[in-house]
Image (cartoon, coloured by chain):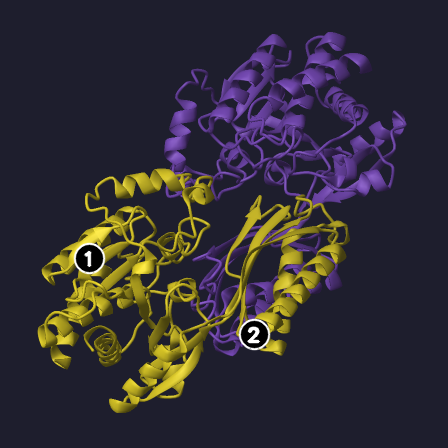
Chain colours: A yellow, B purple
Amino acid sequence: MHQKIEEKMIDYLENLAQCGRTANDGVTRRLYDVFWCDAQQMLTTLCKNAGLDVCHDKVGNLFGRRQGSNPLAKSILSGSHLDTVIDGGKLDGIYGVISALIAIEMLYLEYGQPDKTIELIAFAEEESSRFDYGFWGSKSFLELADLREVSALVDDEGISFLEAMEFALKGLDDIGNRSYKEYAAFIEVHIEQGQILEKSQKRIGVVEQIVGLVCYEFLLKGVSNHAGTTRMDERADAMLTYAEIVVSVTAYAKKEGFVLTFGKIKCTPNSSNIIAGEVFATIDMRAPNTQKLAEYAQHVEKIIYTLSKNNNTTATIHKWLNQAAQKFDTTLIETLTLICEKKQIPYKKMPSSAGHDSQIIAPYIPTAMIFVPSIKGISHSPKEATHIKDLVVGVEVLMELLYELAYK
Amino acid sequence: MHQKIEEKMIDYLENLAQCGRTANDGVTRRLYDVFWCDAQQMLTTLCKNAGLDVCHDKVGNLFGRRQGSNPLAKSILSGSHLDTVIDGGKLDGIYGVISALIAIEMLYLEYGQPDKTIELIAFAEEESSRFDYGFWGSKSFLELADLREVSALVDDEGISFLEAMEFALKGLDDIGNRSYKEYAAFIEVHIEQGQILEKSQKRIGVVEQIVGLVCYEFLLKGVSNHAGTTRMDERADAMLTYAEIVVSVTAYAKKEGFVLTFGKIKCTPNSSNIIAGEVFATIDMRAPNTQKLAEYAQHVEKIIYTLSKNNNTTATIHKWLNQAAQKFDTTLIETLTLICEKKQIPYKKMPSSAGHDSQIIAPYIPTAMIFVPSIKGISHSPKEATHIKDLVVGVEVLMELLYELAYK
């Protein structure tokens, strides 16, 4: 069976990686773009070949259903997201979707029809790599998002969210009704995207919680002026302020032991011989303790304001995401640890420092997450990789859990 | 006469500011774009109304000629550039062109035909705001540039230099032959773009030299990775390296007393939840002493390499411009100071920290530059401004010099 899972895994991953492959051998598959549409089609075909009933909800979340024999029981849901970051890898998100597909297939081959319905889900969007909105798929599934929230959003090319959505969904003729209330459990398999498992030589991570996340956008305003004729002591240089903030805030994060990233910047006018008049930038900061994270965030804001003032520049700060840490279902966590022990798979209970659809689902459906190791911890990069044996173990653990939940 | 110059100045400046006016009330008029074409047409009309013979050379430098009575004498040339930076002001470049036009007009009204031919020039390009090439106008005029150098260049929209050039020049039907060898002197009037004149309460700057200029592009390579799961001590963050370089190099420039600017940055993948894999950026550094500047540049390179290495990132540095300081013609400088003294205009001999067409011309034609004060030193910005009385004084000094050179 191990061999069969491995073959399917390689085959399915390769097929999906074609949907948005980049020049760097990475994948860029953003919400509602043509590659996203390709992936929808590919996944629909794979699900149908596996004998699943496929439908989409009205935002393009894909469901692949293996009907159970007990019509009264709630269903079991497993999957992850279909989209990727810009020039991301071949595993983030889609590995969890493919794991669910293979697990459902293999369980059927082994044990026939389940008692409870098992369903695969491919969330339309999680990464916010096209529009300034994340978890669109899982939030829509839970009826937490609606079109009014996204109607003003446009992507980098000026295409509006609604235009993009209409373009992508117009070809879908299998719209079905799905309510999150139909489900008894949600399980997401995912690559770790860090080095905890690799360094501790474990093959499975049983995720106990997702860390808290605070996201900032901030705008520094100085005075754009001539690079030659403006004396150093007469400048209001937004770029210098930015650089001082990066250095100072990063040192603070290292001292306090939380992770923090300055990943995005836009400088105006962005010309080599003009002093930066404006710098727009972002901060992404995460910590397991929600209360501590709030304290860190407050201090970071203080640093930004202080350094801006010292450089004759001004700062406007917008905290656009403030997400508390989210714990997962203790019964499911317990079941997963028992499975790993029974199968003698080296595992580790751990937090996730990355955000996942699971954290959105967890307050509404009992939820668990299974991690497999990432080689060198690299993710959100074309170099993202996991040993094939570990990808297979992830599916095997998922199969055991689905068996416990849907067949017993 | 003062009143007449003022009226013409306001009128002409306003007309030209319409060619590329931006939402911020600035001007964006880049080489060979539609606004550049508008400005060519506008200037041609103004020159013809003033009785000048207009022609263009094959790159679009515009010449407006007032024929002198002595066919054997070399001509006197005055002007500046037609293009602007992105969202620049209404004076940089075009003020020097308009000053030449008004001076030639007023001299003719006052004294009739000159002995020597006086000619206005509007250089096609100086700012390198569209393509990575500066001084295209003056270098082409001197036969220092040719099409092979620019044939590979494309602008931000992917339009090639040659396409853009063909688009802009196809309508011009007045191509003439001009050789730099025909000219006995070149005088450029320009706004100071700094605060030296304003702070010392002078109205005219007699420019003695242009400072040396070194321009770098550099690329920092780290590893793009997940913002949540990558521990701070495991990162190779190109943005952190960049920030440390900005802070350290800026401190060095302040200590040594030269000007240095980090004006342009491009981060890849530039996503808020991904550690920066690459940062591409620029440095613009200037100093009056060519030898000193070379030493500063060497030290800056050392800082870049050292900090890159400390952060597990790598640096590739490209010094794309290395321009020695350029002195102007001592006889012309002397004549200008005598004019200011005679007319009792408060003036100052000074260096220019900005680059100008004059520095390209100076090795080939005896050259002088006249500065007028910039309010608060602001330039390369929609807020760029000079008091109208000072704009007029600039023209009056130019008229005196042209009179000395072409009428006596």
Residue B148 to residue B6: above or below: below
Q: Do we see residue B296 in this rendering?
A: no
Residue at the image point whose x is 31% and y is 84% from the top: A203
Residue at the image point whose x is 59% and y is 76% from the top: A254
Spot occupied by residue A356 in the image (x, y as percentages of width and height): 40, 65
Tell me the quarter of the picture where residue A387 sits: bottom left
Tell me the quarter of the picture where residue A199 sits: bottom left
Return the residue nearer the eye: B218 or A310.
A310
User: Pointer 2: what residue?
Assistant: A289
The amino acid type, in three-letter code, at marker 1 is Leu
Secondary structure, mark 2, is loop
Q: Earlier in the sequence, mark 2 or mark 1?
A: 1
Within-10-Å neighbours for mark 1: few <14, some 14–19, many 20+: many
Residue B98 to residue A164: above or below: above
Spot occupied by residue B189 in the image (x, y as percentages of width and height): 70, 30
Question: Distance between the Cα atoms at labels 2 and 1?
Answer: 38 Å
Within-10-Å neighbours for mark 2: few <14, some 14–19, many 20+: few
Residue at the image point whose x is 64% and y is 72% from the top: A252
Spot occupied by residue B145 in the image (x, y as percentages of width and height): 47, 39
Question: Which circle, 2 or 1, is nearer the viewer?
Answer: 2
User: Pointer 1: what residue?
Assistant: A43
Q: Quadrant of the C terminus of chain B?
A: top right
Left or right of A260, for residue A385: left
Return the residue nearer the eye: B251 or A57.
A57
Q: Do we see residue A405 in this rendering?
A: yes
* Chain letter for the residue marked with disc 2 in the picture: A
Residue A237 to residue B121: above or below: below
* Chain letter for the residue marked with disc 1 in the picture: A
